[in-house]
Amino acid sequence: MDEKTPILPPPAVSNCQCRCRSDNKKKRVFKRIALFLIGLLALHAFSHRFQSFRSDWDDGVVSAQCYNGEAPIQWEGKTSYDVDPAKFPNLSVVQNGSVTGGFVKTFTQSDDDLAHINVNIHFSEPYLQDQINIIIDDSENGYNFTVETPKHLRRECINVEITIALPNSAQFNKLAISTINSKIELLDDITTEESISLQTINGSIHAEYVKTNELVVNTVNGGITIEKADAHTVVFHSVNGAIHANVDAEKISAKTINGSIHLDNIGDGTAAAINTETVNGSTHVSAPKNFEGAFSLKTVYGKPNVFSQSKSDKLHIEKARRNAMEGYYGSPVEDSYISSETRMGSITMKFE
Ligand SMILES: *[C@@H]1O[C@H](CO)[C@@H](O)[C@H](O)[C@H]1NC(C)=O
Ligand SMILES: *[C@@H]1O[C@H](CO)[C@@H](O)[C@H](O)[C@H]1NC(C)=O
Ligand SMILES: *[C@@H]1O[C@H](CO)[C@@H](O)[C@H](O)[C@H]1NC(C)=O
Ligand SMILES: *[C@@H]1O[C@H](CO)[C@@H](O)[C@H](O)[C@H]1NC(C)=O
Ligand SMILES: *[C@@H]1O[C@H](CO)[C@@H](O)[C@H](O)[C@H]1NC(C)=O
Ligand SMILES: *[C@@H]1O[C@H](CO)[C@@H](O)[C@H](O)[C@H]1NC(C)=O
């Protein structure tokens, strides 16, 4: 509004004589026009604000209903599915399309040998009823379960909650969970033979205990917290979010851009290949118990710090600068290393 106020002419200062009357008349007309324009502008601004206030208010009511779990309309499709790991060793659960809330939760609690997938879908507008689909593809690579919602939403809301109850008595070979807009949670002990893959774009990923051969965890906007993972290879990837994990693995890669990294290797191996990278955030890494091999720490605005809790004679620092350090612990072992990089933040590396 301020920028748009017309600039009034400066008050006349001429010591007027003959042209005075007509000047005054012109001034009056000009003043009226200016006032009229200001009035129009004000009216326009007011109605605009009122409209955006109204739609904010409508959106507010709709999304408050959704987030309180009282989104008015329940999806009427089939919501319970059973999967037999003996028949379908690879399970993939996908949420594809836009949602405004929800989660994918996995736990180990099934009393029989089957996995039970349940979905709970609520939304705000009646026409969405037939725009939501569950697609099952059990043709080749195991059992693929997809909840599909419209690609784009405006002011509508859709809340999709997916729970996967895994059996205690049987294991999948592969478990893949992929969502676009919700968080992923793995509770209890989740074990598979070959791999666990967790993927989202807008959402955090949290796991209590996972055991597998290959663990891959990806998000864009959200943190990753893994209370305990037991695997051969582990990959953590975020963009906007911190990574916190306790891991027993030989190969670990943890990368983010905006967020700190806290990685404790709780294994007792000798050789390990550990790589961490962030841009804006500090890093803490601890080596596995019997680690031997090289280390490297690089930062730009921050301090590198390496120490050994009880065996400092094993710590060999070969290069130490204000913002970088290199060396080895125990002895240099081929392909065994811990490497950490950041730009803004300190790095702490801890050995036994
Ligand atoms: C999600 O849906 C789009 C089409 O809307 C499709 O191209 C894409 O492959 C789907 N992704 C998954 C993981 O199913
Ligand atoms: C499960 O996935 C693996 C690796 O992609 C594949 O080799 C195997 O055939 C799949 N199993 C089944 C039963 O589809
Ligand atoms: C099933 O899902 C897996 C993992 O998400 C994928 O690699 C595979 O291509 C999918 N299979 C089919 C038939 O869609
Ligand atoms: C992720 O969230 C941001 C901000 O809320 C939004 O602009 C973006 O469209 C979302 N991305 C996806 C894939 O839904
Ligand atoms: C990092 O986070 C800050 C605020 O916390 C944000 O302004 C910035 O855009 C983020 N950077 C990236 C690459 O997303
Ligand atoms: C770095 O992270 C801090 C704290 O998360 C944030 O406030 C800041 O905006 C970030 N800086 C950049 C350049 O993203």
Image (cartoon, rainbow, N blue to C red):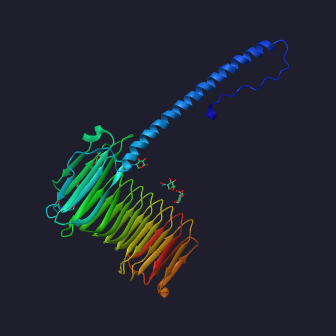
Percent position of residue 345, x then y: 53, 66
Given residues 287 and 324, the one toward you in this image is 287
Given residues 159 and 23, the one toward you in this image is 159
Q: Residue at x 38, y 57 (%)?
A: 219
Q: Residue at x 41, y 66 (%)?
A: 254
Quadrant of residue 128 in the image?
Answer: top left
Q: Work out whether residue 174 can be spotted.
A: yes
Image vertical order of residue 83 relative to residue 171, above or below = above
- Screen quadrant of the N terminus: top right
Q: Work out whether residue 141 can be spotted.
A: no
Image vertical order of residue 294 relative to residue 13, above or below = below
Left or right: where 76 falls relative to 344: left
Image vertical order of residue 8 relative to residue 294, above or below = above
Percent position of residue 8, x then y: 70, 26
Left or right: where 20 falls relative to 69: right
Percent position of residue 301, x then y: 57, 65
Given residues 247 and 232, the one toward you in this image is 247
Left or right: where 141 falls relative to 190: left
Q: How many numbered marks appear?
A: 0
Quadrant of residue 61 in the image?
Answer: top left
For the view shown, which residue lies furthest in the left direction? 87
Percent position of residue 236, x then y: 38, 64
- Screen quadrant of the C terminus: bottom left
Image vertical order of residue 81 relative to residue 132, above or below = below
Q: Residue at x 51, y 77 (%)?
A: 306
